[in-house]
Image: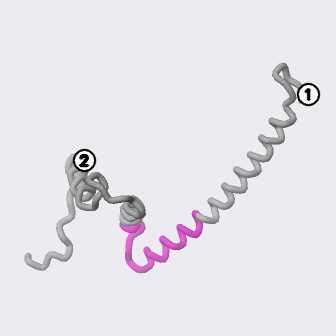
Amino acid sequence: MNDESPSGNLTELKVYLKKTADHVIDLKAARAEINSQIGAAKAKVAAKGIPKRAFNRALQDYEATKNVEPDETTDAATVDEAYVIAREALLIPIQGNLFDVDK
């Protein structure tokens, strides 16, 4: 295959594609290392008695509220109320207050 095409020279495109492929491979390697570090951090949390699934849920909520400007659609009370409504709609039971001692 030659580097000429009806629309022009392909050499520049091939160089760009090679650089992009190398960059993507480097990013994947970095992501694998980061994922490994995240997994190790979550394993330490689990070793302290907090199930990974519970921590992941809390982390997701924390990430969703971190650095967000509060307004009527993102304040914690609105999000909590909407979450309960969504769980009820999906027939997912709501856990009672674990720390309610008046039983």
Report whether residue 40 is seen: yes
Where does residue 6 sit, x and y in percent of width and height?
84, 19
Q: Decide which of 90, 10 is in the foreground and name it.
A: 10
Q: What is the crowding at mark 1: few (fewer than 14 residues within 10 Å), some, or many (at least 20)?
A: few
x, y (%) of residue 84?
22, 55
Q: Where the N terminus falls, by quadrant?
A: top right
Whether residue 53 is visible here, answered yes or no, is no
Asked if the residue under mark 2 is in contact with the one under mark 1, i.e. CB atoms within 8 Å, the reply is no
Q: Does the magenta stretch include residue 89?
A: no
Q: In this view, does 86 lie to the left or right of 12?
A: left
Q: How crowded is mark 2: few (under 14 residues within 10 Å), some or many (20 or more)?
A: few
The quadrant of the image that shows the C terminus is: bottom left
Query: For the point 41% across and 64% down, which residue is it?
Result: 66
For the magenta stretch, what is the residue range?
A: 35-55
> In the image shown, does 28 or 78 lie closer to the viewer?
78
Q: What element carries label 2?
A: loop
Residue at image location 81% in from the left, 22% down from the top: 7
Considering only vertical position in the picture, is 4 above or below 63? above
Is residue 45 depicted above or below 64 in this figure?
below
Nearer the observer: mark 1 or 2; the answer is: 1
The one of 70 and 18 positioned closer to us in this rendering: 70
Query: What label sits on residue 90 in the rendered view?
Result: 2
The residue at which mark 1 appears reads as 2
Q: Position of residue 85 (x, y in %)?
A: 21, 51
Locate residue 62: give its quadrant.
Answer: bottom left
